[in-house]
Each structure stands twice: as C-alpha cells, then as structure tokens.
Amino acid sequence: MSSLFTRIIQGQIPGEFVLRGELWVAILDINPSAPGHCLLIPVAEAQHLHELPAATLAGLGPALARLTAAVRRATGCPALNVVVNDGPAAGQEVPHAHLHVIPRFPDDGRRAGLFGGKRAEAAALAEMGARLRAALAEP
C-alpha cells in the first residue's frame, strides 16, 4: 500500500505543494511547528533515507537548498531547523523518508533540538568512532 505522502504526490489526497520536481517535492506541513514549516519528500517511496535511490539522494542537496532559501525569503526567518526523523524510534510518523524545514525566530519559545546530552568520555568517543569507521568501510 502506498504511503500517505505517495498518495499526496499522486494527487489522491490534497496537499499544499510549494515545490514539485522529478525527484523531490515540498508541501506545507498540516500541523506546522511554525508558519512556513515544510516537508521535503522524495518521490521515490522508502521509509529510511539510506534506502532511497542514488539519483534521489543526489538531488537532495539542490532541492533542500532551493527550499530553505524560499522559506527564509517567504517568512523572513533569520534561521531554520532541518530535521529528519529517520524511523519510528526517532519520531517518524509516516513511513516515507522526508525532511522538515522549520522557520525559526529569536525567542520563539521552541526548543532547538535533541542536543545537549552529557559529555562523553574520550574512550567512549574513540570506541564509537572506530565502530562508525568500520561500518562505513562495509559495502
């Protein structure tokens, strides 16, 4: 069964499109964190970013750059958050990869993100660094 986003992209469900491309589309979020909150969605359906086709991933940078510039111009925001919830444990509600582009203003009362945990020890950083380098070396 097609995801909610695929059905929106195909016109089966309405969406307020702000960008339409061959590989990526952007719509306004119906439950925005701020006015101008957009979702950048790949046309290809995959739950996780790493499952997307290479051409789709290659098109992400240009699509994201266009959208973030447009959101800044349209809202006058001095900053924004680009958020990816890649999987249900990360808060992904629709099983179709997507990015949130959220306009931010000084003192808007919104939390910046999930940063600010306790400081890691050097040995723990070294161990995780080795694990990540090994994972990157895998095919």
Image (cartoon, rainbow, N blue to C red):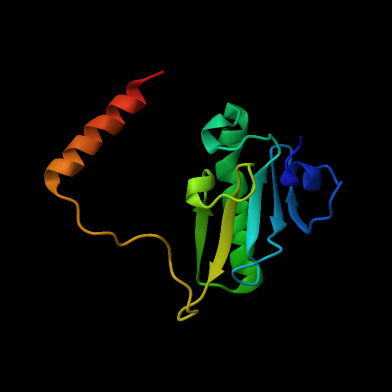
- Image location of residue 90, percent across then percent down: 48, 49
- Image location of residue 102, percent across then percent down: 56, 64
Drawn side of residue 64 relative to residue 135, left or right: right
Drawn side of residue 81 relative to residue 98, left or right: left
Image quarter where the N terminus lies is top right
Relative to 126, is 105 above or below? below
Farthest-out residue, bottom: 107
Relative to 13, is 51 above or below? above
Q: Residue at x 76, y 37 (%)?
A: 2
Q: Nearer the viewer, residue 30 or 42?
A: 30
Q: Residue at x 42, y 62 (%)?
A: 113
Image quarter where the C terminus lies is top left
Farthest-out residue, top: 139
- Image location of residue 8, percent across then percent down: 79, 48
Relative to 139, is 13 above or below? below
Q: Residue at x 52, y 49 (%)?
A: 85
- Image location of residue 4, percent across then percent down: 74, 46
Q: Quadrant of residue 60?
A: top right
Q: Residue at x 53, y 46 (%)?
A: 88
Relative to 7, is 108 above or below? below
Drawn side of residue 14 relative to residue 85, left or right: right
Q: How many marks?
A: 0
